[in-house]
Amino acid sequence: MINAVDIRKGMNIIVGGKLYVVLDRQHHKPGKGGAVMRTKIKNLDTGAITERTFRGGDKIEETYLERKKHQYLYSDKNGCFFMNMETYEQISLSKEQLGKSVGFLKENMDVNILMHVDRIIGVDLPKNIVLKVTYAEPGHRGDTATNVQKQATVETGIEVQVPLFINIGDSIVINVETGKYVSRN
């Protein structure tokens, strides 16, 4: 157990029997009364983000997530399949468990499976990923006066806004958290 004033960004905590990750925190000392810790926390089961205020003397249970290295193999209508790189055991996760991460998975990609007491929480992907463009409208010469973008489809099937100079076959870097184009690779 830790004091509420010891909460840090990125920490995993249990509140009311549910697992959360701290997205942001702000220590506040009002003129009257004790210090409080205002936090923005994300429920790791539902993905819901809430704001919660803890008093300075509150005790919070800190927990740790285990990261196990896996390789993404393939997906079908039943889910996505991963292989543990140490034991070679295969596990299946539903697309609902993966959420938006499923659009960034490509075969033979190394990922970390997040686990809490033998329960799978989700998949930890790299911050940026390189994907090949499979479809993009052609850009027209002279349309570069402003930051004009067009829709492009990448090899995993997701659509991304890209600059006009990106063509079919180009490899691009996409930020996984925002789903936005970063650069050409």
Image (tube, grey):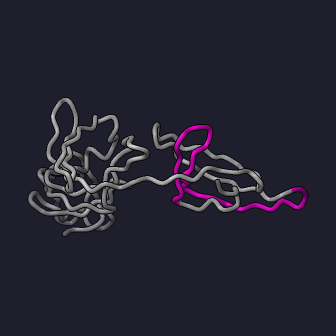
Q: Quadrant of the C terminus?
A: bottom left
Q: Position of residue 157 (x, y in %)?
A: 18, 44
Q: Provide the residue span drawn in magenta.
A: 10-33
48 w.r.t. 151: above or below: above
Which secondary structure dominates the residues rendered in magenta? strand
Instruction: Tell me: 11 left or right of 35.
Output: left
Closest to the observer: 139 or 181? Answer: 181
User: Seen from this angle, which residue lies furthest top?
Assistant: 78
Residue 57 lies in quadrant: bottom right
Residue at the image position 63 percent from the left and 59 percent from the top: 7
User: Seen from this angle, which residue lies furthest left?
Assistant: 169
Closest to the observer: 140 or 31? Answer: 31
Residue at the image position 33 percent from the left and 44 percent from the top: 100
User: Seen from this angle, which residue lies furthest right?
Assistant: 32
Residue at the image position 14 percent from the left and 54 percent from the top: 108
What is the total number of numbered labels drawn onto the structure image? 0
Q: Position of residue 30 (x, y in %)?
A: 84, 59
Q: Position of residue 181 (x, y in %)?
A: 29, 60
Magenta stretch: includes residue 13: yes
Magenta stretch: includes residue 153: no
Residue at the image position 23 percent from the left and 38 percent from the top: 92
59 w.r.t. 94: above or below: below
Q: Position of residue 35 (x, y in %)?
A: 80, 59
173 w.r.t. 112: above or below: below
Closest to the observer: 173 or 13? Answer: 13
